Image: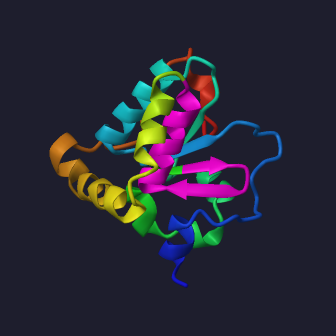
Amino acid sequence: MKTGDLMDNAQRYHGSAPSEIKHPVVLFDGVCKFCNGSVQFLLRHDKKDRLRFAALQSEYAHRLLPPELLDESYLDTMILAEGSTFYTRSTAVLRICKHLGGGWSLLYAAGIGIPRPLRDALYRFVAKYRYRLFGKYVRCMMPTEAVRRKFLDL
């Protein structure tokens, strides 16, 4: 089984996730303007303070992720870490919606029924052109003091 297959199937890994982290962790491309905008959206809509965040380029992500997921080709992939389980691409996005609760969890319920290859095809299309469409930062964003505690890589 290829590494991508392992990741897409949300295999369980036992690794170096710090035991004090009790929240789902959203790992994102820290230099992508679209990804940063998505994180800003999540920060506004995470009313129950469930999610934590880290850039895929961070030292924290390198400690958290199993070796199979550290390949640079995964920088175009949003990863959601829930304990020792890692979800990627469209499944990660849908599970994040579920964590937001309220009406967003309906998006999870509707979307999870769509076959993953179809969902991921759309995800990969957006990921492939995200820099061209939305741009790229020279370095990772710096959050405001008010949301700094939600970021695990600072």
Q: How far from the left and from the top, in percent, is residue 12?
A: 70, 64
Q: Which residue shows up at 55% across the image and 26% down it?
A: 101
Q: Which residue shows up at 16% across the image and 50% down it?
A: 132
Specify whether 78 is left or right of 137: right
Q: Check the picture and name the quadrant holding the C terminus.
A: top right
Residue 82 drawn in magenta: yes
- Quadrant of residue 54 within the rendered picture: top right
Residues 112 and 148: in front is 112
Is residue 142 visible to us here? no
Q: Which residue shows up at 32% across the image and 61% down it?
A: 118
Q: How far from the left and from the top, in percent, is residue 57?
A: 50, 53
Residues 53 and 42: in front is 42
Q: How far from the left and from the top, in percent, is residue 144?
A: 49, 19
Q: Which residue shows up at 51% across the image and 82% down it?
A: 2
- Quadrant of residue 9 within the rendered picture: bottom right
What segment is highlighted magenta in the picture?
80-101
- Quadrant of residue 153 within the rendered picture: top right
Specify whether 26 is left or right of 74: right
